[in-house]
Image (cartoon, helix red, strand yellow):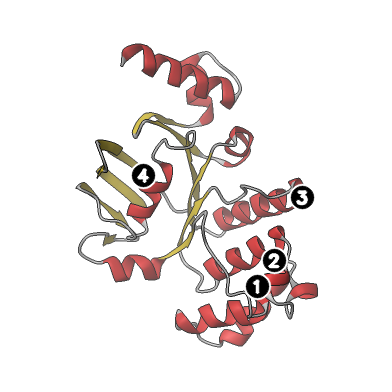
Amino acid sequence: MIEARGLVKRFHSPRTVVAVDHVSFRCLPGQIFGLLGPNGAGKTTTLRILSTLMAPDEGSAVLNGYDVRREPERVRASIGYLSTSTGLYGRLSAREMILYFARLQGVKEPGRRVDELVEEMGLAAFADTRCDRLSTGMKQKVSIARVLVHDPPILILDEPTAGLDVLVARSFMELMERARAAGRCVLFSTHIMSEAERLCDRIAVIHRGRILANASLEELRLATGQHYMESIFVHLVEQAEKQA
């Protein structure tokens, strides 16, 4: 489970900007939780805090029973984190890249685990190709395999389908659905509203660092009188701007 508790993060260059403003939510096992918002809304900063890459100025969070402030190493062992800037070692093959992280994570029988992921991710034809020669979609698949290699109970994914073509994006969404069916807790950020409509059990809309709504899609439809997620999002943001 992920539980964010009043997270606050400020940046002070040159003026103070509150990037995350008392953000709280819960994501349960077997659930896909979507964090929606435009660029600069606070999505990435929130995920970096949850992944222990950044310390909050206020508040805290618990992931898989471990506090991000007091037990960051245990949190890291419990999560698979995919950032928008996740890189690959260009001179390693796809297989070598996944194997390296399997060993780094202390995976038992790392070779067998790599073989499983190569098959699951549809990488067999490219497994021995150097990463710097892979297409954008194949690179993303290798990055995702790296995230999954230690079979973490929690997945934190920052705009995972950004820049992917329709087929690769669809394949990735199917992977998230399988992760949910396996009982994983899946938190992902996106500004692609159709992804949230298809995948999410709960959706939080974030704007200017604040959570404007946190509910199921049906609850959001009832609350706003809008049907499509894009219309719901625009409605919530416009209401927030009027009240600012």
User: Mark 3 and mark 1: span between their CA atoms?
Assistant: 19 Å
Tell me which amino acid carries mark 3: Leu
Name the side, left or right, on which 241 lies relative to 220.
Answer: left
Helix, strand or loop for disc 3: helix
Residue receiving disc 4: 26
Few, some or many residues within 10 Å of mark 2 (<14, 14–19, 20+): some
Tell me which amino acid carries mark 4: Arg
Marks counted in the figure total 4
Mark 2 vs 3, N-terminal side: 2
User: At which x and y percent is residue 217?
Assistant: 53, 29
Given contact means CB atoms under 8 Å apart, are the residues at marks 1 and 2 in contact?
yes
User: At which x and y percent is residue 184?
Assistant: 49, 58
Residue receiving disc 3: 167
User: Mark 2 and mark 3: span between their CA atoms?
Assistant: 13 Å
Pick out the residue farthest to the right.
Answer: 125
Image depth: mark 4 or mark 2 in front: 2
Mark 1 vs 4, N-terminal side: 4
Residue receiving disc 1: 117
Residue receiving disc 2: 121
Given contact means CB atoms under 8 Å apart, are the residues at marks 1 and 4 in contact?
no
